[in-house]
């Protein structure tokens, strides 16, 4: 940044300066390998939707021409949500033994823990934006889990993939709008100022729809895996307490086949 006559400056960069960036991925590896219930080769299928959403995110950033300064901030939110959902599928088998409310809290705690690790991975310095990221991650976790819970109830506690996903789309859109309202309120308190009423309405309508769509698309590959693969379908039904519908084509062969 000096004149061309200035001597080049050197900086001794050590590997551990950026080691915190791998913290969230290390947590995912631990969740993948440590639980005994995951000692099954089928569990590696969870990497497929994780890779899909990451490739989609990279393509979106490239096509939209997102500045690097903004991309780094959105990376924190995206990887928190993507890795959090993947971790939730990996530990869901341990939550089935608890009641509905406790199970909800444990799922929420999983998403929040991954979100905190994501913030530590992308920034080890706390600033005024850190509470904003935490608030957004908390609210998104509540919106997603609330939408899943309501969709489960409206399916009558039965395994109906298409009906479940339709209800999930509606509740995620509504939940994201509510989460955005909470985020605006928290942001106004932290930053000592907020948008005008007309701007708040525009943010709520447009921003809530975009946020809900992004959250639904991010969750969609994981849900498809849960519906298509018997290993994860069993976890999905057990964690939500869903019962298979007679004649359901998505039931495992062991259940639909003839018995001697």
Image: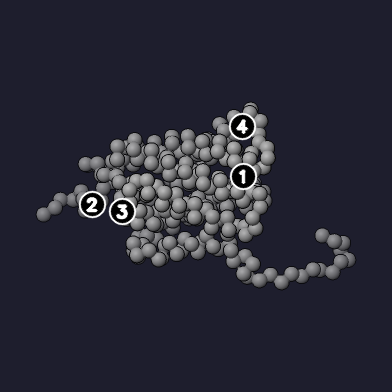
Q: Residue at x 51, y 36 (%)?
A: 178
Q: Earlier in the sequence, mark 2 or mark 3?
A: 3
Q: Position of residue 166 (x, y in %)?
A: 39, 36
Q: Which residue is mark 3?
A: 97
Mark 3 and mark 1: Cα distance apart in space: 44 Å
Disc 1 on helix, strand or loop? helix
Q: Residue at x 21, y 53 (%)?
A: 254
Q: Residue at x 30, y 46 (%)?
A: 241
Mark 2 and mark 3: Cα distance apart in space: 25 Å
Q: Which residue is mark 4?
A: 200
- The image quadrant where one finds the C terminus is bottom left
Query: Measured along the vertical axis of the image, is residue 177 above or below residue 86?
Result: above
Cβ–Cβ below 8 Å for labels 3 and 1?
no
Q: Which mark is residue 253?
A: 2
Disc 3 on helix, strand or loop? loop
Q: Earlier in the sequence, mark 3 or mark 1?
A: 1
Q: Earlier in the sequence, mark 4 or mark 2?
A: 4
Q: Earlier in the sequence, mark 4 or mark 1?
A: 1
Mark 4 and mark 1: Cα distance apart in space: 24 Å
Front disc: 3 or 1: 3
> Would you say residue 85 is visible in this rendering?
no
Q: Which residue is mark 1?
A: 64
Q: Earlier in the sequence, mark 2 or mark 1?
A: 1
């Amino acid at each position: 940044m000096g004149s061309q006559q200035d001597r080049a400056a050197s900086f001794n960069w050590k590997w551990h300066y950026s080691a915190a960036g791998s913290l969230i991925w290390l947590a995912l590896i631990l969740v993948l390998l440590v639980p005994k219930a995951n000692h099954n080769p089928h569990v590696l299928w969870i990497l497929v939707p994780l890779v899909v959403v990451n490739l989609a995110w990279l393509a979106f950033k490239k096509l939209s021409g997102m500045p690097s300064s903004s991309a780094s901030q959105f990376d924190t939110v995206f990887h928190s949500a993507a890795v959090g959902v993947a971790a939730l599928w990996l530990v869901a088998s341990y939550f089935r033994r608890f009641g509905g409310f406790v199970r909800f809290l444990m799922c929420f705690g999983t998403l929040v823990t991954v979100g905190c690790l994501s913030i530590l991975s992308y920034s080890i310095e706390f600033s005024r934006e850190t509470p904003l990221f935490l608030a957004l991650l908390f609210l998104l976790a509540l919106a997603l889990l609330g939408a899943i819970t309501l969709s489960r109830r409206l399916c009558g506690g039965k395994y109906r993939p298409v009906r479940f996903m339709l209800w999930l789309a509606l509740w995620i859109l509504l939940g994201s709008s509510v989460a955005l309202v909470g985020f605006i309120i928290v942001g106004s308190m932290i930053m000592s100022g907020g948008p005008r009423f007309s701007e708040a309405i525009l943010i709520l309508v447009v921003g809530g729809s975009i946020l809900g769509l992004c959250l639904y698309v991010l969750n969609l590959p994981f849900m498809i895996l849960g519906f298509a693969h018997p290993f994860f379908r069993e976890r999905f039904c057990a964690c939500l307490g869903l019962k298979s519908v007679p004649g359901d084509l998505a039931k495992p062969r062991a259940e639909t086949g003839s018995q001697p």
